Amino acid sequence: MDTSSLGGILLALAGILAGLLLEGGRIDQIMQPTAAMIVFGGTLGAVMLQYPLATVLAALRRLAQVFFQGKSAGQATLKQLVEFANKARRHGIVSLDQDLAKIKEPFLKQSIMLAVDGTEPAELRKIMELQLDNLTEREEKIPAVFESAGGFSPTIGIIGAVLGLIQVMQHLDHIDQVGRGIAVAFVATIYGVAAANLAFLPIAGKLRHRIREEHRVKEMVIEGVISILEGMNPRMIEVKLESFLGAGSKAKGRKAKESAEAATEEVPA
């Protein structure tokens, strides 16, 4: 669970609702199903018009990453690359062919496969960077879907408010109901602006951050495999690749390594 995402949305909602209640309002005043239908239905329709259905569905599938942060693959990938470097130094790069079936990450697997097949380091870098560029171009559309939704929803909220006002103007003969009708009409505007600034735009930012983390690990893979091909010392490779990981990841990795070494020392001879 990403406590930052969960805490952020709860804090924002609590602040807004507390302000409403302190001003003497009631929560039921902003609970308007028709306004929600206009804003969210209209926003979804506009987004589907702008992007292919496959892109919209891919963006929706990524929503879970906003609130649930998967275990970082950075340290595990670094450890795997160092193991491959040690094996390649002892038995040659071709010995890594036996490990291909165990590699689950497709990008790493393809990089090692190219290295085993005798691809030159410069050519391997060119191939894998091209793949990473194409992947980046595709995945950049995912946060862009939510950014577009954040742009559409306030305007569609205004459309909802205008529709509500049209209905109010048709009943001016009941002047006592006009004020209440206008208040209800503007709920759609609240939904549109709130959806954009409390949901769509922050979600786009968080997904962009997640995607960048994934791409950084892939950049580390390219640099690691090329370093193995060039015969660099495994310890030097480890130090070099640690620069791709954040300070928190480095600290966790060092702690895990120290724990493993301590456990090894405690084993009686």
Image (cartoon, rainbow, N blue to C red):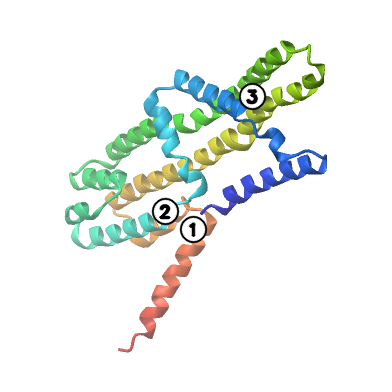
The 10 Å Cα crowd at callout 1, few under 14, some 14 to 19, many 20 or more, is some
**Left or right placement of residue 242 versus residue 99 in this view:** right
Q: Secondary structure at mark 1?
A: helix
Mark pair 3, 1: CA separation: 39 Å
Kind of residue at badge 3:
Pro
Residue nearest the observer in this picture, 211 or 215: 211
Circles 2 and 1, Cβ within 8 Å, touching? The answer is: yes
Q: Which residue is mark 1?
A: 249
Coordinates of residue 193 in the picture (x, y in percent): 66, 29
Q: Which residue is mark 2?
A: 74
Q: Which residue is mark 3?
A: 154
Q: Residue at x 48, y 51 (%)?
A: 69
Count of number-bearing discs? 3
Kindly indicate the quadrant of the structure image that contains residue 195.
top right
Circles 3 and 1, Cβ within 8 Å, touching? The answer is: no
Coordinates of residue 90 in the picture (x, y in percent): 22, 63
Coordinates of residue 71 in the picture (x, y in percent): 43, 55
Kind of residue at badge 1:
Ser
Kind of residue at badge 2:
Gly
Q: Residue at x 44, y 39 (%)?
A: 62
**For marks 2 and 1 on the same chain, the one whose residue lies earlier in the sequence:** 2
